[in-house]
Amino acid sequence: MQFSRLYGLATLRGLPLTRLRNVLRRFGIAIAFALLLVILSVLSGSFLTISNLLNIARQVSINAVIAAGMTFVILTGGIDLSVGSVLALSGAVIAGLLAAGRPVLVGIGGGLAVGALLGLVNGLVITRGRVQPFIATLGMLTIGRGLTLVYTDGRPITGLPDPFVWLGAGEVFRIPVPVLIMMLVFLASSVILTQTVVGRYVYAIGGNEEAARLSGVNVAAYKTLVYVVSGVVSAASAVILTGRLNSAQPTAGVGFELDAIAAVVLGGTTLAGGEGSISGTILGAFIIGVINNGLNLLNVNPFYQQVVKGAVILLAVLLDRRLR
Amino acid sequence: MPSVDVPLLEMKGITKSFPGVRALQDVSLEVRAGEVHALVGENGAGKSTLIRILGGIYPRDAGQILLRGLPVEVASPTHARQLGISIIHQELNQVPALSVAENIFLGREPRRVGGLVDWDEMYARAGRLLADLGVSIDPRRRLGTLTVAEQQLVEIAKALSADAAIVVMDEPTAPLTVEETERLFGFIHDLRARDVGIIYITHRLEEVFKIADRVTVLRDGLHVGTYAIAGLTMDELISLMVGRRLTEKFPKEDVPLGPPVLDVRGLTVQGFFRDVSFILRHGEILGIAGLIGSGKAEVAHAIFGATSLDAGEILLDGRPVSIRSPADAIALGIGLVTEDRKRLGLVLSMSVRANITLPIVRRVAVALFIRRLEETALITQAIRDLDMAVTSPEQIVRNLSGGTQQKVVVAKWLQTRARVLLMVEPTRGIDVGAKVEIYHLMVALARRGVGIVMVSSEMEEILGMSDRILVMHEGVITAEFPRAQATQEGIMASAAGRVHSAV
């Protein structure tokens, strides 16, 4: 109600506000993020400190990396619910290999391969099997979790070598390594989506799959590819999480798909596909991270934190829809 | 029998404009009780607009609607139904997952006390309606399990259940077989016996002579006249529909024809067309005419690899080729300008840039990285060549006018340096100026040696732009006319299924 009234005011006044509306439409999420930063800085003295900001970045990194892959998937009009389970299985395989004394690179390679494989299965079930992405990846969510429990026998895998733990817990010039990994993933994703043929096709498929097909795009191949990308970056986030926890947990990543989807949608990518950006997703992930952090600093009851987080996400998206 | 003095329905002086188009001007239609009144005209003549005004879908700009002599305002489709006007649209508005009875009573289900649906009553009434029509369909069956013809009958039952005084049928026989059509005609006779007034829209003129009492002819939004069928021949009706000639807007030039570029033999796609063979030469514009449902658009899609062939072979420049996907076709130098640019031709959410280079973006890329400068050069050239009304290559295609959007589609295929261009309804829904520009472009392409197959439902453009014309009817080629011998009457007769003997 309040929003429609706000919106009504803006339209009633008419022309002078169209420019403002355009600015809001384009940078609405960025403005919301800036406001959030200002409000939290005022409310809590310890918010705007370098150590806290780095802390936020580190906490955000895992979700942000997954959300980058999710952006590819959602841009094609799909969805990947299996990311949390893919993370768990990849993490378990990495830890299993490392605990057995394999070199760090072999462990990581094995984990990424598992992510790629599960993503490939998702993609093939969706394109060749013509199963809706929601259902196909829901199946993989359950299968992946089950395989993780089988592989770990339901127990954490510990005893990981220091160089690997560094990937999740280390720092370079005070910057946490996970933050560097996140930056790398976002840089690569951004380049792929804006500068390459692959990005063009991803947007085209999400915008109008039939027109893309009639323009000679191999729709099935590129749709499969985005699920592979999502699987691989989920495995990359498993590297961070497993290193940080110094162990692989069989229940790691439960519910991560929802935070990733929330980040993508907050970032302005439409679930219908074809429209959105990787820079929006970064902002979305950071908004979620800053809300989490701020509520902690303000000592809000953790039970209420979930309510607030959900409400903020809904409000942001509602506002965004109103402005479009 | 009510007196025939007061017509059941009168539409007088109906005028309707859309932005930039006058769809109807001073059109009248009069339907008597117990009459089958045919409404005919070429595509774009205004038949659908007139019916939508009657059905409360469009408001009219001027004119009057009288029901049994009393003026009425049809405010909405629901209101139309309350007034006893039932429209059976060309695309059936039905819910396949619901039962036959539920579809018949959708939105006005019989209720029990407390608002719950009275299922017994609903099935009983649906059963009675269908029985009255002499149809044996179980009202509890899911609609989706019925044949298209049976669905059509359910739609008719629905129209009757609303106690319709006027039933409008828009191309009802398009999906029907010969036997089903005969049954439909049987029902129409029954309806007529019950004093229902029937407005019957069709492109199949032989049907008009079979079941209609009178016919109203529309052309370019104007009322040509209303005639008793008894005093009319098919040839007379065709010339009434076609009217004047218009050739000056077509810049067709004679281009010396080269060797055959496309040679198709015995193409067949089950359920759409069969045994289609023709040869297209370099520099030739080959027109394919035919009614909706004749399979003409499907032929183009099949050659392009968008649908797979059940039989037939394709030769390009004399060599047999295998086309299994649009990607294959593009690689071989075949382009397809689709009939529905919004649904099939463009990615509306993307920029002019991304749309124009979509089929060839790999060509301007090195190791998958798009060379933006090179791409921009191509786009700038295309925008200039086609005189596109765009402010920048980054403009989103959704925001362009229909004519400019169509130029984007054409520009896209010019990039592929196609030797064969399949153009389906190349000027549908764009204004006259943009049409002429597209025609100029076709001529320029032909001069460069491109072979063009132009599939069109617009008679004028078929006659004005083609070197040679093929006519299709129900999936087969029924006639071929060289440019010099083609007449609108001849094409229309062949498209309506009459075997043409003048050639």
Image: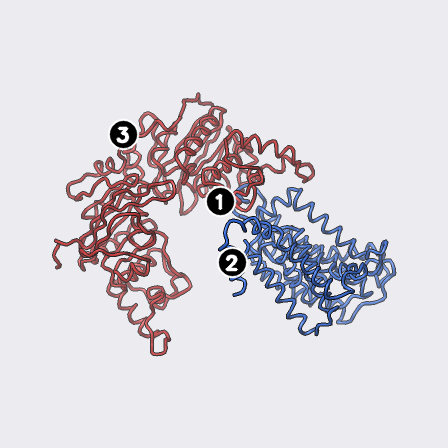
Chain colours: A blue, B red
**Kind of residue indicated by mark 2:** Leu
Dot 3 corresponds to which residue?
Answer: B502
- The chain carrying label 2 is A
Please identify the quarter of the rendering in which residue A131 is found.
bottom right
**Kind of residue indicated by mark 3:** Ala
Dot 2 corresponds to which residue?
Answer: A9
Q: Looking at the image, is mark 3 or mark 1 nearer the viewer?
A: 1
Alpha-carbon span between mark 1 and mark 2: 39 Å
Could you say which is closer to the camera, residue B15 or residue A264? Answer: B15
Residue A202 x %, y %: 61, 48
Crowd band around label 1 with a 10 angstrom C-alpha radius: few (<14), some (14–19), many (20+): some
Dot 1 corresponds to which residue?
Answer: B344
Q: Respond whether the residues carrying marks 3 and 1 are from the same subunit.
A: yes
Image quadrant where one finds the C terminus of chain B: top left
Alpha-carbon span between mark 3 and mark 1: 38 Å
Q: Is residue B392 left or right of residue B343?
A: right
* SS category of the residue bearing label 1: helix
Q: Disc count in the image?
A: 3
Q: Is residue A284 left or right of residue A61?
A: left
Q: Is residue A224 above or below residue A90?
A: above
Mark 3 or mark 1: name the one nearer the start of the chain.
1
